[in-house]
Image (cartoon, helix red, strand yellow):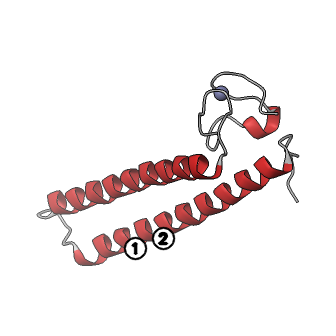
């Protein structure tokens, strides 16, 4: 049971929950992938005083992969919003990931009502 009740109509709320569920699944998958890469770096990359540059480069690679994964997740969220119609009917801005349009019922970009 949600702690805060959404003000959106049931069809928009269902779309929001479905997109949020997929978003959370992808975030968990990305976190698992990141931890797996960090584990590989910690085990297989030589470290110590003479090899600290290679370990640092591998860590920068892992961080870059994580940042790109986050970027791709948000792009996928926006594509789901457009595909399923979870967008503002006035300015067509994807509503997922924005500042809680489900709490106020207004578009965060153009401030039109979502009803
Ligand atoms: Zn709008």
Q: Is residue 73 above or below residue 100?
A: below
Quadrant hosting residue 55: bottom left
- Answer left or right for 112 relative to 46: right
Residue at image coords 73%, 23%: 112
Badge 1 density bin: few <14, some 14–19, many ≥20, Cα 10 Å: few
Quadrant hosting residue 60: bottom left
Calculate the distance from the C-alpha at mark 2 to the C-alpha at mark 1: 6 Å
Residue labelled with disc 2: 32
Residue labelled with disc 1: 36
Count of numbered tags: 2
Q: Is residue 40 above or below residue 89?
A: below
Counting from the top left corner in percent of width and height, residue 50 is at 11, 63
Q: Quadrant of ligand 1?
A: top right
Residue at image coords 86%, 40%: 7
Q: Is residue 106 above or below residue 24?
A: above
Counting from the top left corner in percent of width and height, residue 45 is at 21, 72
- Foreground residue among 4 and 91: 91
- Foreground residue among 19 and 100: 19
Residue at image coords 49%, 54%: 73
- Foreground residue among 40 and 89: 89
Counting from the top left corner in percent of width and height, residue 9 is at 85, 44
> Is the C terminus in the top left, top right, bottom left or bottom right quadrant?
top right
């Amino acid at each position: 049971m949600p702690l805060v009740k959404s003000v959106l109509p049931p069809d928009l709320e269902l779309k929001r929950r479905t997109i949020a569920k997929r978003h959370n699944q992808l975030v968990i998958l990305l976190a698992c992938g990141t931890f797996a890469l960090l584990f590989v770096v910690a085990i297989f990359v030589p470290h110590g005083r003479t090899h600290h540059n290679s370990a640092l480069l591998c860590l920068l690679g892992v961080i870059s992969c994580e940042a790109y994964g986050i970027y791709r997740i948000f792009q996928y969220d926006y594509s789901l919003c457009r595909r399923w119609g979870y967008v503002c009917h006035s300015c067509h801005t994807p509503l997922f990931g924005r500042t809680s349009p489900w709490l106020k019922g207004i578009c965060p970009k153009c401030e039109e009502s979502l009803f």
